[in-house]
Amino acid sequence: MVYQNQQGYYNALNLADKKNNVTVFIQFMLDVLKFTLDNIIASRIKKTIQHDPVNGGVNGGVNELQKKYWRQCRAIQI
């Protein structure tokens, strides 16, 4: 996950160092983790829907609620 975002990792790390504030680096890492988890979840839902369309569709709806929750959390500035 970091390897694929290596340049952004170093950019965020350097910016955090320049600002003497790790917030930008932590935000970058959280964004990378969220992106990775979203892809894992989407992949699993796709496999579930292919295997069991009825329950897979229900779980897919739950995933949409999770996405909405994450968007709301992201909108809150800490």
Image: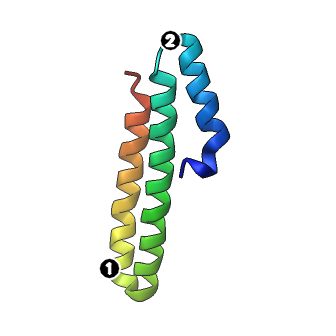
Q: Is residue 77 left or right of residue 19?
A: left
What residue is shown at x 52% (from left), y 34% (from top)?
28
The answer to whether 76 is drawn above or below residue 56 in the figure is above
Q: Tag 2: Cα neighbours inside 10 Å, few (<14), some, or many (≥20)?
A: few
Q: Position of residue 25 (x, y in %)?
A: 50, 28
The answer to whether 43 is drawn above or below residue 55 in the figure is above
- Helix or strand or loop: what does disc 2 sit on? loop
Measure the alpha-carbon separation of dots 1 and 2.
Answer: 49 Å
Q: Position of residue 18 (x, y in %)?
A: 59, 13
Residue denoted by label 1:
55
**Mark 1 or mark 2: which comes first in sequence?**
2
In front: 28, or 71? Answer: 28
What residue is shown at x 60% (from left), y 20% (from top)?
15
Q: Is mark 1 in CB contact (under 8 Å) with mark 2? A: no
Check the image and name the residue furthest to the right.
7
Residue type at the position of mark 1: Asn
Disc on res. 20: 2
Mark 1 or mark 2: which is in front?
Answer: 2
